[in-house]
Image (cartoon, helix red, strand yellow):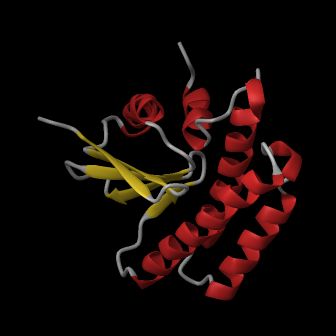
Amino acid sequence: MRSHATYGKLIKNPFMNSEGSIHNQISWHNKVQSSVNRIVFHCSSTSVTTFEFLKKVSVEWEDLKKSTFYSERHFYLVLVPLTDHLLKWFLVNKMSAELKKIDSETMLFIEGSQETSSFAIQKMMVGVTEPVFEEFCIFVSIYCKYKFGRKPTVIEVYDLLHEKKFIWREWR
C-alpha cells in the first residue's frame, strides 16, 4: 500500500516516473509540470503583480533545457500556449474575490471547507489525457480520504497545454 507522502508526490506531479520513458515524453511532462507547480504556487498569493507573474514564468522557462524536448520547435510549441493559458488563469484568479487555499504538498487548490459537507479540488496540469485524469482522480480521492477524512465532491483538472477542463463529480 502506498503511503500518504507517495500519493502527495503523485498528485503534485502525475508525470513523475523514476524509470523515464522512450522519447523523453515523461521527462518533458515531468519537468514542465514541476515548473508549472512552482509558478502556480508562487502566484497563488493575491499580492503578486502581473509583472512578478511574468518574471516567474520567464525564470521557470529559462531553467528548462531545450534538449529535454523533442526539438527546439517542440519546446516553443509547448511553452507558448502554456504561457498564454497560465496568464489567462492568473488574470482570472486575480479578479476573483473568492480565494482558494493551496496545499503546498500537492499543489492542489481546495475550494470550500473540509468542515462542511462538500469541497472541491482543482489542479493545473500539462497535457492531460482521459486515462491520466481518471488515475489522478483515484489518487486525489485516496489522498483526501486520508488527509481530510472524506473525499472531495468535485475534482477539476485544467489542462494548461490544450486549455481544456476535466471534471469529476461524486454522485451520491
Left or right: residue 158 versus residue 81 is left
Q: Residue furthest top?
A: 1
User: For the point 75% across and 24% down, which residue is it?
Assistant: 22
Q: Quadrant of residue 140?
A: top left
Q: Position of residue 84 (x, y in %)?
A: 58, 72
Q: Can you say which quadrant of the picture contains the C terminus?
A: top left
Q: Quadrant of residue 79?
A: bottom right
Q: Quadrant of residue 4?
A: top right
Q: Position of residue 89 (x, y in %)?
A: 49, 71
User: For the point 61% across and 72% down, which residue is it?
Assistant: 43
Say if residue 44 shows up in the picture. no
In the image, residue 15 above or below residue 34: above
The residue closer to the viewer here, 129 or 76, is: 76
User: For the point 31% across and 42% down, which residue is it?
Assistant: 152
Q: Position of residue 85 (x, y in %)?
A: 53, 68
Q: Position of residue 165 (x, y in %)?
A: 37, 53
Say if residue 154 shows up in the picture. yes
The residue closer to the viewer here, 28 or 100, is: 28
User: For the point 39% across and 31% down, which residue is it?
Assistant: 134
Q: Residue furthest left?
A: 172
The count of marks equals 0
